[in-house]
Image (spheres, rainbow, N blue to C red):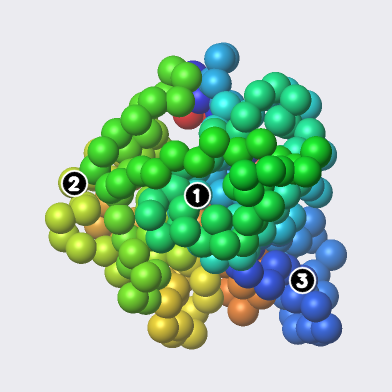
Amino acid sequence: MMKLTFLGTGTSCGVPTIGCECYTCRSTDPHDKRLRSSVLIETATTRLLIDCGPDFRQQIMTQPFRKIDGILITHAHYDHMGGMDDIRPYCQFGEMNVYADPIARKGMLEMLPYCFAEHRYPGVPAIQLHEIHPHQPFHIGDLEIMPFQVMHHDLPILGYRIGSLAYITDMKSIAETEIPYIMGCDTLVVNALREKPHHSHQTLSEAVLFAQRINARQTWLIHSSHDIGRHAEVNASLPANIQLAYDGQVLEL
């Protein structure tokens, strides 16, 4: 049994967006409050994060304080790894194992140079940075992780297949050669920014078409902006097996 908790389901600006008085941002429904996208995945013996954005401290305070066995980074944008300094309390369990492709690895070295200096000052996060590559599986505890590649406009980024789960964020397009790594998944998590076209993110319509192609039993849409509309209204318009996820939602996989 694997449990997935959506720590955040929003885009880089979050919802509500600062200074905005739009219909979605004025909603009082807690489902319309979206922190930056991240998930916590747990089995009986293993605990890992996918992405660690700037809302990590707020997100993880809702969870029991226990060892995190690894952090999977999808790409080097700030909304996906801007919370790495806040992993410091978890380093009392030992070095934090962080997994990233060469581009994201370079970004992390540039963003957190003090964590990788020869002479580190006391208290900085203790990070063991592992370079990973698409189609080269690896294990964290009892979980096998298969990275695959999607395109965030012209930036190659990673999605992850973990058992019956496929997790994708910030995708605009995907090569045909990557589809076999996703097909057959029971649960698909994938990004849907808004309905208006965007140069580097899927629209809601594009995400629905992609989900229907993959034909997972259930698809959950994430990385959504205020422009997508209110949670309840959008979900009412979607097929029952393709729905917006919400912050704090828990799936038993």
**Mark earlier in primary sequence (3, 1):** 3
Q: Position of residue 83 (x, y in %)?
A: 69, 53
Q: Which residue is mark 2?
A: 180
Q: Is residue 241 left or right of residue 12?
A: left
Disc 3 or disc 1, which is closer to the eye?
A: 1
Q: Which residue is mark 3?
A: 16
Q: Is residue 174 above or below residue 120?
A: below
Q: Spatial distance from mark 3 to mark 2, Cα to Cα?
A: 36 Å
247 or 128: which is nearer to us? 128
Q: Residues within 10 Å of mark 3 (few under 14, many from 20)?
A: many
**Mark earlier in primary sequence (2, 1):** 1
Dots 2 and 1: beta carbons under 8 Å?
no
47 or 3: which is nearer to us? 47
Q: Position of residue 19 (x, y in %)?
A: 83, 83
Dots 3 and 1: beta carbons under 8 Å?
no
- The answer to which image quadrant residue 244 occupies is bottom right
Q: Position of residue 240 (x, y in %)?
A: 47, 51
The residue that appears at 56% across and 15% down in the rendered structure is 45
Q: Which residue is mark 1?
A: 73
Q: Is residue 26 visible?
A: yes
The residue that appears at 56% across and 49% down in the rendered structure is 51
